[in-house]
Amino acid sequence: MAQSGSSCAAALSKEDLPSSSAVMSTSVAGHSAQVAFADQVVFLARFDDGWMVTAAGCSRTSRDTSAPYDCTVKGG
Amino acid sequence: MSRKKGFVRDNSLSIVFGLMLVVTLVGQSLWGLVGYNQAARTADLQQVSLLRYLTSSSFAVDLSENWQSEYLQFTLYILLTVWLVQRGSSESKKPGESGRETDEKQLLGPFARADSPHWARVGGWRTAVYSHSLVIVMTAIFVLSWSAQAVTGRVANNEERMRDLLDPLSLGAYLGSPDFWGRTLQNWQSELLAVGSMTVFAIYLRERGSPESKEVGAPHDATTSDD
Protein backbone atom coordinates (compact mmCIF):
# COMPACT_ATOMS: atom_id res chain seq x y z
CA MET A 1 0.00 0.00 0.00
CA ALA A 2 2.99 2.27 0.62
CA GLN A 3 3.75 1.85 -3.08
CA SER A 4 0.45 3.53 -4.05
CA GLY A 5 1.36 6.71 -2.14
CA SER A 6 -1.98 6.91 -0.29
CA SER A 7 -3.47 5.65 2.98
CA CYS A 8 -4.13 1.95 3.38
CA ALA A 9 -7.91 2.25 3.38
CA ALA A 10 -7.93 4.54 0.33
CA ALA A 11 -5.50 2.37 -1.58
CA LEU A 12 -7.38 -0.83 -0.76
CA SER A 13 -10.63 0.60 -2.09
CA LYS A 14 -8.93 1.24 -5.43
CA GLU A 15 -7.74 -2.34 -5.77
CA ASP A 16 -9.88 -4.68 -7.83
CA LEU A 17 -10.50 -7.14 -5.01
CA PRO A 18 -13.36 -9.65 -5.36
CA SER A 19 -16.20 -9.12 -2.88
CA SER A 20 -16.89 -11.75 -0.24
CA SER A 21 -18.29 -15.04 -1.44
CA ALA A 22 -18.80 -18.54 -0.08
CA VAL A 23 -15.92 -20.07 1.89
CA MET A 24 -14.82 -23.22 0.14
CA SER A 25 -12.09 -24.34 2.55
CA THR A 26 -9.86 -23.17 5.37
CA SER A 27 -6.43 -24.42 6.35
CA VAL A 28 -4.43 -23.52 9.45
CA ALA A 29 -0.87 -24.57 10.25
CA GLY A 30 1.08 -22.92 13.05
CA HIS A 31 1.07 -19.17 12.45
CA SER A 32 -0.15 -19.42 8.82
CA ALA A 33 -3.60 -19.88 7.36
CA GLN A 34 -5.36 -19.93 4.00
CA VAL A 35 -9.03 -19.30 3.27
CA ALA A 36 -10.29 -20.29 -0.16
CA PHE A 37 -13.43 -18.41 -1.33
CA ALA A 38 -15.33 -19.20 -4.49
CA ASP A 39 -13.51 -16.47 -6.43
CA GLN A 40 -10.28 -15.78 -4.53
CA VAL A 41 -7.84 -17.13 -1.99
CA VAL A 42 -6.69 -15.18 1.07
CA PHE A 43 -3.60 -15.87 3.17
CA LEU A 44 -3.36 -14.90 6.84
CA ALA A 45 -0.73 -14.86 9.59
CA ARG A 46 -1.18 -14.88 13.35
CA PHE A 47 0.16 -11.96 15.38
CA ASP A 48 -0.16 -11.06 19.04
CA ASP A 49 -3.25 -9.01 18.12
CA GLY A 50 -4.86 -11.89 16.24
CA TRP A 51 -5.08 -13.14 12.65
CA MET A 52 -4.30 -10.63 9.91
CA VAL A 53 -4.54 -10.89 6.14
CA THR A 54 -1.12 -11.00 4.50
CA ALA A 55 -2.29 -11.51 0.92
CA ALA A 56 -5.69 -11.14 -0.74
CA GLY A 57 -7.24 -11.39 -4.18
CA CYS A 58 -5.04 -14.42 -4.88
CA SER A 59 -5.53 -16.73 -7.84
CA ARG A 60 -3.58 -19.35 -9.69
CA THR A 61 -1.86 -18.23 -12.87
CA SER A 62 0.11 -21.45 -13.37
CA ARG A 63 -0.80 -25.15 -13.24
CA ASP A 64 2.52 -25.75 -11.51
CA THR A 65 1.60 -26.13 -7.84
CA SER A 66 5.15 -25.12 -6.89
CA ALA A 67 4.45 -21.63 -8.21
CA PRO A 68 2.96 -19.25 -5.61
CA TYR A 69 -0.45 -17.64 -6.00
CA ASP A 70 -0.58 -14.31 -7.79
CA CYS A 71 -2.15 -11.85 -5.34
CA THR A 72 -3.64 -8.40 -5.92
CA VAL A 73 -2.68 -7.26 -2.41
CA LYS A 74 0.34 -8.52 -0.48
CA GLY A 75 1.67 -7.49 2.91
CA GLY A 76 5.29 -6.86 3.86
CA MET B 1 26.81 -41.23 51.42
CA SER B 2 28.69 -44.39 50.32
CA ARG B 3 25.38 -45.93 49.06
CA LYS B 4 24.76 -42.79 47.00
CA LYS B 5 28.32 -42.88 45.66
CA GLY B 6 27.81 -46.57 44.79
CA PHE B 7 24.58 -45.78 42.90
CA VAL B 8 26.24 -43.04 40.86
CA ARG B 9 29.27 -45.20 40.12
CA ASP B 10 27.12 -48.20 39.09
CA ASN B 11 24.91 -46.06 36.84
CA SER B 12 27.46 -43.52 35.62
CA LEU B 13 26.98 -44.39 31.92
CA SER B 14 23.24 -43.69 31.85
CA ILE B 15 23.59 -40.68 34.17
CA VAL B 16 26.23 -39.02 31.98
CA PHE B 17 24.36 -39.73 28.74
CA GLY B 18 21.15 -38.48 30.35
CA LEU B 19 22.82 -35.21 31.34
CA MET B 20 24.33 -34.79 27.85
CA LEU B 21 20.88 -35.40 26.36
CA VAL B 22 19.40 -32.63 28.52
CA VAL B 23 22.20 -30.19 27.62
CA THR B 24 21.89 -30.85 23.89
CA LEU B 25 18.09 -30.63 24.01
CA VAL B 26 18.35 -27.22 25.68
CA GLY B 27 20.85 -26.14 23.04
CA GLN B 28 18.66 -27.39 20.21
CA SER B 29 15.67 -25.54 21.67
CA LEU B 30 17.51 -22.23 21.94
CA TRP B 31 19.15 -22.35 18.50
CA GLY B 32 15.94 -23.59 16.95
CA LEU B 33 14.10 -20.59 18.43
CA VAL B 34 16.73 -18.22 17.01
CA GLY B 35 16.37 -19.76 13.55
CA TYR B 36 12.57 -19.77 13.64
CA ASN B 37 12.42 -16.11 14.69
CA GLN B 38 15.02 -15.10 12.08
CA ALA B 39 12.76 -16.58 9.39
CA ALA B 40 9.75 -14.79 10.91
CA ARG B 41 11.60 -11.44 10.92
CA THR B 42 12.66 -11.95 7.30
CA ALA B 43 9.01 -12.47 6.34
CA ASP B 44 7.85 -9.54 8.53
CA LEU B 45 5.86 -11.92 10.70
CA GLN B 46 5.39 -12.42 14.44
CA GLN B 47 8.30 -13.76 16.46
CA VAL B 48 7.49 -16.32 19.14
CA SER B 49 8.50 -17.01 22.73
CA LEU B 50 10.55 -20.05 23.77
CA LEU B 51 7.47 -21.72 25.25
CA ARG B 52 5.49 -21.14 22.06
CA TYR B 53 8.37 -22.56 19.99
CA LEU B 54 8.71 -25.65 22.19
CA THR B 55 5.03 -26.46 21.59
CA SER B 56 5.27 -25.85 17.84
CA SER B 57 5.32 -28.41 15.06
CA SER B 58 8.57 -26.88 13.84
CA PHE B 59 10.37 -28.00 17.03
CA ALA B 60 8.50 -31.30 17.21
CA VAL B 61 9.46 -32.37 13.68
CA ASP B 62 13.14 -31.53 14.26
CA LEU B 63 13.05 -33.70 17.39
CA SER B 64 11.03 -36.62 16.02
CA GLU B 65 12.98 -36.94 12.74
CA ASN B 66 16.14 -37.58 14.76
CA TRP B 67 14.53 -39.87 17.28
CA GLN B 68 12.84 -42.12 14.68
CA SER B 69 16.12 -42.77 12.91
CA GLU B 70 17.94 -43.61 16.15
CA TYR B 71 15.34 -46.20 17.08
CA LEU B 72 15.29 -47.59 13.55
CA GLN B 73 19.06 -47.97 13.79
CA PHE B 74 18.79 -49.88 17.06
CA THR B 75 15.91 -52.03 15.78
CA LEU B 76 17.82 -53.03 12.65
CA TYR B 77 21.08 -53.53 14.49
CA ILE B 78 19.57 -55.71 17.22
CA LEU B 79 17.55 -57.77 14.73
CA LEU B 80 20.10 -58.23 11.95
CA THR B 81 22.91 -59.24 14.33
CA VAL B 82 20.81 -62.32 15.18
CA TRP B 83 21.46 -63.76 11.73
CA LEU B 84 24.21 -61.70 10.06
CA VAL B 85 27.85 -61.81 11.12
CA GLN B 86 30.99 -59.78 10.53
CA ARG B 87 34.16 -61.80 11.02
CA GLY B 88 36.63 -59.93 13.20
CA SER B 89 34.19 -57.37 14.56
CA SER B 90 33.50 -56.84 18.25
CA GLU B 91 29.93 -55.95 17.20
CA SER B 92 29.12 -59.40 15.83
CA LYS B 93 28.56 -62.98 16.87
CA LYS B 94 31.12 -65.46 15.65
CA PRO B 95 30.57 -67.04 12.20
CA GLY B 96 28.56 -70.22 12.69
CA GLU B 97 26.61 -68.84 15.64
CA SER B 98 23.83 -67.22 13.56
CA GLY B 99 20.24 -67.67 14.67
CA ARG B 100 18.18 -67.62 17.85
CA GLU B 101 20.55 -69.92 19.77
CA THR B 102 19.71 -72.81 22.09
CA ASP B 103 17.61 -72.60 25.26
CA GLU B 104 20.71 -73.60 27.17
CA LYS B 105 22.70 -70.63 25.90
CA GLN B 106 19.71 -68.32 26.39
CA LEU B 107 19.07 -69.59 29.97
CA LEU B 108 15.48 -70.59 29.20
CA GLY B 109 13.27 -73.49 30.24
CA PRO B 110 15.18 -75.94 32.46
CA PHE B 111 18.28 -73.79 32.06
CA ALA B 112 16.73 -70.67 33.61
CA ARG B 113 18.42 -69.48 36.78
CA ALA B 114 16.82 -68.55 40.07
CA ASP B 115 17.72 -64.92 39.42
CA SER B 116 16.54 -64.93 35.77
CA PRO B 117 13.81 -62.36 35.04
CA HIS B 118 10.34 -63.66 35.99
CA TRP B 119 8.99 -63.67 32.41
CA ALA B 120 12.08 -65.63 31.29
CA ARG B 121 11.34 -68.35 33.87
CA VAL B 122 7.54 -68.78 33.51
CA GLY B 123 7.45 -70.03 29.92
CA GLY B 124 4.45 -69.76 27.58
CA TRP B 125 3.44 -66.51 25.82
CA ARG B 126 5.13 -64.36 28.43
CA THR B 127 8.55 -65.89 27.73
CA ALA B 128 7.85 -65.64 23.98
CA VAL B 129 7.06 -61.91 24.30
CA TYR B 130 9.96 -61.24 26.67
CA SER B 131 12.31 -63.01 24.24
CA HIS B 132 11.58 -60.24 21.71
CA SER B 133 10.83 -57.37 24.11
CA LEU B 134 13.84 -55.30 23.10
CA VAL B 135 12.93 -55.26 19.40
CA ILE B 136 9.24 -54.83 20.20
CA VAL B 137 9.89 -51.69 22.26
CA MET B 138 12.50 -50.25 19.88
CA THR B 139 10.19 -50.81 16.90
CA ALA B 140 7.22 -49.29 18.72
CA ILE B 141 9.20 -46.15 19.57
CA PHE B 142 10.44 -45.97 15.95
CA VAL B 143 6.91 -46.25 14.55
CA LEU B 144 5.53 -43.68 17.01
CA SER B 145 8.30 -41.16 16.39
CA TRP B 146 8.19 -41.61 12.60
CA SER B 147 4.42 -41.05 12.76
CA ALA B 148 5.03 -37.94 14.87
CA GLN B 149 7.53 -36.74 12.26
CA ALA B 150 4.91 -37.20 9.53
CA VAL B 151 2.16 -35.34 11.40
CA THR B 152 4.26 -32.47 12.75
CA GLY B 153 6.35 -32.24 9.59
CA ARG B 154 3.21 -31.71 7.54
CA VAL B 155 2.11 -28.84 9.83
CA ALA B 156 5.57 -27.22 9.85
CA ASN B 157 5.89 -27.58 6.07
CA ASN B 158 2.37 -26.20 5.51
CA GLU B 159 3.13 -23.22 7.74
CA GLU B 160 6.06 -22.36 5.46
CA ARG B 161 4.11 -23.14 2.29
CA MET B 162 1.24 -20.80 3.20
CA ARG B 163 3.77 -18.15 4.25
CA ASP B 164 5.14 -18.47 0.69
CA LEU B 165 1.60 -18.21 -0.83
CA LEU B 166 1.45 -21.92 -1.73
CA ASP B 167 -1.36 -24.39 -1.11
CA PRO B 168 -1.02 -26.59 2.00
CA LEU B 169 -0.55 -30.35 1.53
CA SER B 170 -2.84 -33.13 2.76
CA LEU B 171 -1.20 -35.84 4.89
CA GLY B 172 -1.21 -38.18 1.90
CA ALA B 173 0.46 -35.61 -0.31
CA TYR B 174 3.00 -34.78 2.42
CA LEU B 175 3.97 -38.45 2.75
CA GLY B 176 5.01 -38.30 -0.92
CA SER B 177 6.76 -34.95 -0.60
CA PRO B 178 10.47 -34.09 -0.81
CA ASP B 179 10.30 -32.53 2.67
CA PHE B 180 9.17 -35.80 4.32
CA TRP B 181 11.50 -38.13 2.43
CA GLY B 182 14.39 -35.69 2.51
CA ARG B 183 14.20 -35.49 6.30
CA THR B 184 13.69 -39.26 6.63
CA LEU B 185 16.46 -40.43 4.32
CA GLN B 186 19.09 -37.93 5.46
CA ASN B 187 18.64 -39.29 8.97
CA TRP B 188 18.57 -42.95 7.91
CA GLN B 189 21.77 -42.70 5.89
CA SER B 190 23.71 -41.24 8.79
CA GLU B 191 22.51 -43.92 11.21
CA LEU B 192 23.36 -46.73 8.82
CA LEU B 193 26.74 -45.13 8.14
CA ALA B 194 27.45 -45.04 11.89
CA VAL B 195 26.57 -48.71 12.45
CA GLY B 196 28.33 -49.88 9.32
CA SER B 197 31.52 -47.97 10.04
CA MET B 198 31.56 -49.06 13.70
CA THR B 199 31.16 -52.70 12.62
CA VAL B 200 34.14 -52.45 10.26
CA PHE B 201 36.36 -50.12 12.32
CA ALA B 202 36.00 -52.49 15.29
CA ILE B 203 37.79 -55.15 13.27
CA TYR B 204 41.01 -53.21 12.94
CA LEU B 205 40.96 -50.43 15.56
CA ARG B 206 41.00 -50.59 19.34
CA GLU B 207 40.10 -48.50 22.40
CA ARG B 208 41.70 -49.94 25.50
CA GLY B 209 39.18 -50.56 28.27
CA SER B 210 36.01 -50.08 26.22
CA PRO B 211 33.55 -53.00 26.03
CA GLU B 212 32.83 -51.82 22.48
CA SER B 213 36.39 -52.73 21.46
CA LYS B 214 38.28 -55.98 21.28
CA GLU B 215 41.31 -56.27 23.53
CA VAL B 216 44.17 -54.24 22.13
CA GLY B 217 46.22 -57.38 21.48
CA ALA B 218 43.36 -59.41 19.97
CA PRO B 219 43.94 -60.52 16.36
CA HIS B 220 41.96 -58.79 13.59
CA ASP B 221 40.15 -61.99 12.61
CA ALA B 222 39.08 -62.77 16.18
CA THR B 223 35.31 -62.15 16.42
CA THR B 224 33.86 -61.31 19.83
CA SER B 225 30.24 -60.80 20.95
CA ASP B 226 28.54 -59.38 23.98
CA ASP B 227 27.83 -62.70 25.69
Image (cartoon, rainbow, N blue to C red):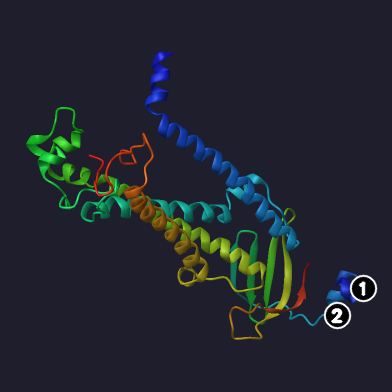
Q: Nearer the viewer, residue A57 or B75?
A: B75
Q: Earlier in the sequence, mark 1 or mark 2?
A: 1
Q: Nearer the viewer, residue B28 or A1?
A: B28
Left/right placement of residue B227 relative to residue B51 reads: left
Bin the neighbour count of mark 2 within 10 Å (Cα to Cα): few under 14, some 14-19, many 20 and up.
few
Q: Specify the subunit that label 1 lies on.
A: A
Q: Are the residues flagged by discs 1 and 2 from a single subunit?
A: yes
The circle on residue A14 is 2
* Residue lying at the far top of the rendered structure: B1
- Identify the residue position indicated by label 1 in the image: A6
Q: Quadrant of residue B121?
A: top left
State which mark lies toward you, 1 or 2.
1
Q: In which quadrant of the rendered image does the N terminus of chain A lie?
A: bottom right
Bin the neighbour count of mark 1 within 10 Å (Cα to Cα): few under 14, some 14-19, many 20 and up.
few
Look at the image and tell me whether residue B41 can be seen.
yes
Q: Which amino acid, mark 1?
A: Ser
* Residue lying at the far right of the rendered structure: A5
Q: Which amino acid, mark 2?
A: Lys
Q: Specify the subunit that label 2 lies on.
A: A
Q: In which quadrant of the rendered image does the C terminus of chain A lie?
A: bottom right
In the rendered image, residue B163, in percent from the top left (x then y), is placed at 66, 67
In the rendered image, residue B126, in percent from the top left (x then y), is placed at 18, 42
Which SS class for mark 2?
helix
* Mark 1 and mark 2 residues within 8 Å of each other at the beta carbon: yes
In the rendered image, residue B71, in percent from the top left (x then y), is placed at 38, 51
Q: What residue appears at the point 34 percent right and 53 percent down from the top-left corner? A: B200
In the rendered image, residue A3, in percent from the top left (x then y), is placed at 87, 74
Marks 1 and 2 sit apart, C-alpha to C-alpha, by: 10 Å
The answer to whether B149 is drawn above or below residue B104 in the figure is below
